[in-house]
Image: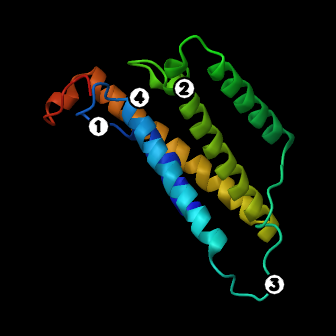
């Protein structure tokens, strides 16, 4: 699960599709949505699988807030849901508006899911060993840095027109 999340952290800033109406933001949101569905499916399958040991892990069976920030994220989602419910235009409040889907309640819930997956992933590795959290942080930081470096290289190539040599559009 940790390696899949590191791949998500690496691929999300770089993901784009040329056949959507908007090449950068909307495909990233679709990728984030499908990734969250995949993570949720993995969590549900792991929850209902029989444990190999006769005693189930009590940490897996209940939800708990590991950090005080978890309660603030849940409170923000609750306030966003209340705001969407009492909004004048509920459709735009839930889904976002045309050309800018990232402002909707669904995307905020997806971002919160990614936060909770990441915080649980780091907290699970903290309970396993003492050196593992540093490895998890190192992997996430390395993936984020490598992704940012790759995005910067593509941006520089696009700025100087080098993408035309590769047969890609310059507004790629």
Question: How many angstroms separate mark 4 from mark 3 (CA)?
Answer: 45 Å
Q: Residues within 10 Å of mark 1 (few under 14, many from 20)?
A: some
Q: Secondary structure at mark 4?
A: helix
Q: Position of residue 84 (x, y in %)?
A: 62, 21
Question: How many angstroms separate mark 4 from mark 1 (CA)?
Answer: 10 Å
Front residue of 56 and 121: 56
Question: How many angstroms separate mark 3 from mark 1 (CA)?
Answer: 46 Å
Residue named by callout 1: 17
Q: Nearer the viewer, mark 3 or mark 1?
A: 3
Question: How many angstroms separate mark 2 from mark 4 (CA)?
Answer: 17 Å
**In this picture, residue 47 sits left or right of residue 25:** right
- Res 94 label: 2
42 is higher (above) or lower (below) than 12: below
131 is higher (above) or lower (below) than 117: below
Q: Nearer the viewer, mark 2 or mark 3?
A: 2
Residue at 78% x, 79% y: name it. 56
Q: Position of residue 144 (x, y in %)?
A: 54, 43
Residue at 70% x, 24% y: name it. 82
Residue named by callout 3: 55
Upstream in sequence: badge 2 or badge 4: 4
Q: Secondary structure at mark 2?
A: helix
Upstream in sequence: badge 3 or badge 1: 1
């Amino acid at each position: 699960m940790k390696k899949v999340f590191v791949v998500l952290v690496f691929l999300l800033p770089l993901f784009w599709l040329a056949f959507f109406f908007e090449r950068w933001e909307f495909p990233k949101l679709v990728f984030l949505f499908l990734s969250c569905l995949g993570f949720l499916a993995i969590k549900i399958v792991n929850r209902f699988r029989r444990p190999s040991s006769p005693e189930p892990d009590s940490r897996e069976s209940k939800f708990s807030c590991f950090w005080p920030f978890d309660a603030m994220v849940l409170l923000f989602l609750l306030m966003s849901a209340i705001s969407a419910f009492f909004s004048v235009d509920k459709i735009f409040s839930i889904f976002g508006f045309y050309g800018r889907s990232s402002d909707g309640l669904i995307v905020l819930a997806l971002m919160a899911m990614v936060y909770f997956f990441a915080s649980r992933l780091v907290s699970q590795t903290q309970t396993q060993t003492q050196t593992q959290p540093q490895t998890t942080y190192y992997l996430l930081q390395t993936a984020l840095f490598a992704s940012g470096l790759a995005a910067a290289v593509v941006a520089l190539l696009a700025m100087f027109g080098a993408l035309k040599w590769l047969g890609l559009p310059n507004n790629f």
